Image (cartoon, rainbow, N blue to C red):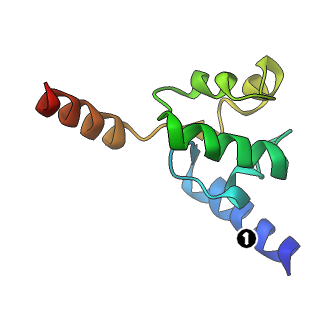
Amino acid sequence: MKKLLLLLVLVCTYVFGAIDLNTASKDELMTLKGVGESKAEAIIEYRKANKFNSIEDIKKVKGIGDKIYKDNKNSMSVDKANKDKDKKEEKKDK
């Protein structure tokens, strides 16, 4: 059943576009090349403390280096709408 769900997530990702690092589920993150359960969990923990402002920020996650970034850079995204919302909230706080 898990394999079927993972396959469905992979197909949906391919059809609908890149994986948003700020909103993707653990299963979605695990569809990235070189990202297993522990790295997916590390990505989620990182984003709880720090938003991803660019896909390059994934290299700040422990265990994610240049190779994983390069293998997946065309499969990842950071939602511009979320970034714009965060900037507006920062301005309100000032």
Q: Secondary structure at mark 1?
A: helix
Residue 39 rendering spot, x and y as whole percentages? 79, 42
Q: Is residue 40 left or right of residue 1?
A: left
Residue at 73% of width from left, 33% of height from top? 72
Nearer the observer, 90 or 75: 90
Q: Quadrant of the C terminus?
A: top left
| Residue 14 drawn above or below residue 49 | below
Displayed quadrant of residue 47: top right
Q: Amino acid at mark 1?
A: Leu
Q: Is residue 35 left or right of residue 43?
A: right
Residue 92 rendering spot, x and y as whole percentages? 12, 33
| Residue 74 drawn above or below residue 8 | above
Nearer the observer, 21 or 18: 21
Residue 21 rendering spot, x and y as whole percentages? 57, 42
Displayed quadrant of residue 64: top right
Nearer the observer, 22 or 72: 22
Residue at 58% of width from left, 24% of height from top? 57
Q: Quadrant of the N terminus?
A: bottom right
| Residue 93 drawn above or below residue 13 | above
Q: Which residue is mark 1?
A: 8
Residue 76 rendering spot, x and y as whole percentages? 61, 38
